[in-house]
Image (cartoon, helix red, strand yellow):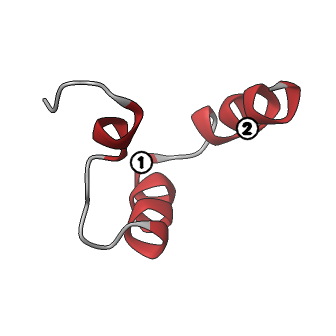
């Protein structure tokens, strides 16, 4: 959990283009990953 919080704080400092590149690399189809955790899709 601590590692995830540190990673989130680090990514929040990135500019938007870098964040979008990370998403495109890790989840190119933009699948809503929250659904797998039991949350309703947006």
Badge 1 vs badge 2, beta-carbon distance below 8 Å: no
Q: Give the number of the disc on residue 10.
A: 2
> Which residue is at the front of the view, 9 or 37?
37
8 or 14: nearer the viewer = 8
Number of disc labels: 2
Q: Quadrant of residue 31?
A: bottom left
Residue at 75% x, 26% y: name it. 5
Residue 37: x percent and y percent? 41, 33
Q: State the residue at coordinates (75%, 39%).
A: 7
Expressed as whole percent of the image width and height from the top left, the position of residue 10 reads 73, 37
Crowding near pointer 2: few (<14 within 10 Å), some, many (20+)?
A: few
Quadrant showing the C terminus = top left
* In this view, the mark in front (1 or 2): 2
- Tell me the SS state at disc 1: helix
Q: Residue at x 39, y 58 (%)?
A: 20
Depth check, front residue: 32 or 12: 32
5 horizontally vs 18: left or right: right
Left or right of 2, for residue 14: left
Residue 28 shows which numbered tag? none
Location of residue 14 in the rendering, given as x and y in whole percent from the top left corner: 59, 45
What residue is shown at x 80% (from left), y 26% (from top)? 1
Q: Is residue 9 above or below residue 7?
A: above
Which quadrant would residue 4 be assigned to in this image?
A: top right
Q: Secondary structure at mark 2?
A: helix
- Per the model, the C-alpha gap separating discs 1 and 2 is 13 Å
Dot label at residue 16: 1
Q: Is residue 41 left or right of residue 30?
A: left
């Amino acid at each position: 959990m601590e590692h995830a919080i540190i990673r989130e704080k680090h990514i929040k400092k990135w500019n938007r283009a870098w964040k979008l590149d990370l998403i495109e690399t890790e989840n190119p189809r933009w699948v809503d990953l929250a659904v797998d955790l039991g949350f309703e899709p947006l």
